[in-house]
């Protein structure tokens, strides 16, 4: 049955009314909700706020390095320490390493740009911080609906956003309602906040509908693949932060590694690959596994045990790719808009700050009797904020790296180390990009295959055993949430021209090409999906569209 047929037979959907509906229970969405309730309490008013979270609980789908700058959290909760926020491990040291295949050169501290300094920051689990933010939000009166996906944007007759509808439950693989069928519900709001993270499913639609990215550089993305290890006590160095550049990437491919020692003999480490890479044979997952074999990385985790795995795309375009963040009836916050600062490898402080700025504009509008219009006070406040200053300073970061890693490293040093020393707080020039990431992939005939080593099961692993420890699960009988505009394109174009990049860029083994009756076909193992959004971004034909699965499905990143 089609969406409209289901509605005609089982509808209409139940509707709930709120002042503000927030889509996404991450740092950006929860901070928006919290700040709204704080303002209401300060002024003796009431604002009804609900947060929809597709994960089983706030934090379940959150994945980040993560080193956190507490600047925004301190603005939101000046007493966060007393409230028990899980920022327990201060950064105690920074290392920036340039790797060759066997060697490592440490950058002298004096030459490390400010963006890589982490004094005053904390090594955290962003999942646990998000869970804590959820608890604070509920204590303030925010309604949180975990396990509910916002699957559809609802519009008023004048084209403004009316709210969202949650996905239907209990639809079988054949598209027909099962015995457990439950119709989705509508949530109407005066304003709707989209805070779904990078490449948000609905945020993507909103940006396209209202042409919010018109006149902006195309958004650029990277894929971060992360592991959590428990190491012997004698290897633990709580608070040590290590970043690497160079091997295993060649000069034309953007990428780098991170390794953070947290509390409790835990090490969190991972590798970030720019999704503008050109060699179709490159596998971000395999690059990460190979990177761990480098002596400078191996020494930290050898004899330890891997206890967690995950992957997530991140926005990396910065200020020049930031779309217009307002439209009739709503706003974009956090990574759904793209506030992450790639040069600092940090986005959680930006998500929290953008949520707070949005909340202040939302509160003024709701209490002023407005609804479904635009909120220019939000971008105006952003332009006067420390976040804008920070992003403006680093606006060229990704653009320089498009010209190769050597140029990128050199110009980052000039812009963020040399210029400040001679009195320039921000570079006096701006560099633009014109190419979207999916257009950068070269045909297989122009690429050299990469021979990756086999996993040893101790230091390096395969994708399926990795997905297993991400606690990923989806109801087996639901339709695949990884959809194809044209079922023939994967074989006819992607396999024939690009040697099937789907089978390599996905860090969860979702896509594989098999032979059936003497013909190639693409198999989609949607069960494995960790909701990273890489396929939606990197597919060279833009034929793959990620849609929301049933609520509660996907990974459960415990302690990640």
Image (spheres, grey):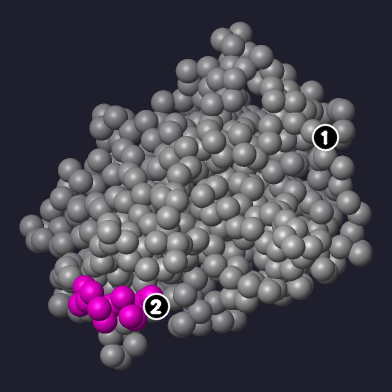
- Residue at image x 36%, y 72%? 152
Residue 213's place in the image compared with 455, above or below, is: below
In the rendered view, does 90 fall on the left or right side of 110? left
Q: Considering depth in this image, is 109 or 274 the residue closer to the camera?
A: 274
Q: Position of residue 506 (x, y in %)?
A: 65, 52
Q: Which residue is mark 2?
A: 2
Dot 1, crowdedness within 10 Å: few (<14), some or many (≥20)? few
Q: Earlier in the sequence, mark 1 or mark 2?
A: 2
Q: Position of residue 330 (x, y in %)?
A: 33, 73
Outermost residue on the left side: it is: 44
Q: Position of residue 188 (x, y in %)?
A: 22, 72
Q: Considering depth in this image, is 403 or 23 the residue closer to the camera?
A: 23
In which image quadrant can residue 154 be found? bottom left
Q: Which residue is mark 1?
A: 453
User: Start and end of the magenta stretch?
Assistant: 1-13
Q: Is residue 421 visible?
A: no
Circle 2 sits in a helix, a strand or a loop, which is it?
loop
Which label is found at residue 376?
A: none
């Amino acid at each position: 049955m089609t969406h409209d047929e289901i509605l005609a037979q089982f509808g209409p959907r139940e509707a709930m009314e709120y002042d503000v509906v927030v889509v996404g229970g991450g740092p950006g969405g929860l901070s928006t909700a919290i700040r709204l309730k704080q303002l209401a309490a300060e002024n003796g008013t009431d604002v009804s706020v609900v947060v929809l979270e597709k994960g089983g609980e706030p934090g379940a789908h959150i994945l980040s390095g993560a080193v956190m700058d507490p600047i925004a959290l301190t603005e939101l909760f000046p007493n966060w320490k007393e409230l028990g926020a899980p920022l327990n491990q201060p950064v105690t040291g920074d290392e920036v390493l340039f790797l060759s295949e066997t060697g490592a050169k440490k950058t002298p501290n004096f030459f490390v740009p400010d963006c890589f300094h982490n004094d005053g920051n904390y090594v955290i689990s962003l999942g646990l911080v998000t869970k804590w933010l959820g608890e604070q939000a509920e204590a303030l009166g925010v309604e949180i609906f975990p396990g509910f996906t916002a699957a559809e944007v609802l519009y008023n007759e004048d084209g403004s956003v009316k709210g969202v509808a949650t996905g239907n439950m209990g639809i079988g693989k054949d598209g027909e309602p099962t015995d457990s069928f439950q119709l989705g519900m509508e949530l109407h709001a005066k304003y709707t906040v989209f805070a779904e993270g990078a490449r948000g499913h609905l945020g993507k639609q909103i940006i396209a509908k209202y042409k919010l990215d018109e006149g902006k550089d195309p958004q650029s993305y990277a894929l971060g693949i992360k592991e959590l290890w428990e190491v012997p006590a004698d290897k633990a160095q709580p608070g040590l932060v290590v970043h690497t550049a160079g091997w295993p990437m060649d000069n034309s491919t953007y990428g780098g590694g991170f390794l953070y020692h947290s509390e409790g003999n835990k090490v969190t480490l991972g590798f970030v690959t720019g999704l503008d890479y050109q060699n179709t044979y490159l596998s971000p997952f395999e690059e990460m596994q190979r990177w761990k074999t480098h002596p400078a990385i191996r020494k930290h985790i050898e004899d330890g045990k891997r206890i967690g795995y995950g992957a997530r795309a991140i926005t990396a375009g910065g200020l020049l790719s930031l779309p217009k963040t307002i439209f009739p009836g709503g706003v974009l916050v956090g990574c759904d808009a793209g506030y992450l600062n790639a040069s600092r490898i940090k986005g959680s402080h930006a998500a929290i700050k953008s949520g707070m700025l949005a909340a202040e504009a939302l509160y003024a509008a709701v209490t002023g009797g407005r609804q479904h219009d635009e909120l220019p006070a939000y971008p105006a406040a952003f332009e006067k904020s420390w976040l804008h200053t920070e992003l403006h300073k680093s606006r060229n970061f990704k653009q320089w790296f498009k010209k190769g890693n050597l140029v990128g490293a050199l110009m980052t040093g000039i812009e963020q180390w040399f210029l400040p020393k001679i009195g320039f707080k921000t570079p006096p020039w701006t560099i633009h990009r014109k190419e979207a990431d999916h257009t950068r992939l070269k045909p297989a005939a122009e690429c050299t295959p990469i021979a990756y080593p086999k996993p040893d099961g101790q230091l390096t692993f395969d994708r399926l055993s990795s997905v297993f420890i991400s606690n990923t699960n989806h109801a087996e009988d639901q339709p695949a949430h990884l959809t194809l505009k044209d079922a023939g394109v994967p074989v006819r174009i992607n396999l024939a021209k690009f040697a099937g990049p789907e089978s390599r860029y996905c860090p969860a083994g979702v896509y594989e090409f098999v032979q059936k009756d003497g013909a190639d076909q693409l198999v989609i193992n949607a069960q494995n999906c960790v909701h990273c959004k890489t396929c939606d971004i990197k597919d060279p034909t833009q034929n793959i569209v990620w849609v929301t699965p049933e609520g509660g499905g996907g990974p459960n990143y415990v302690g990640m």
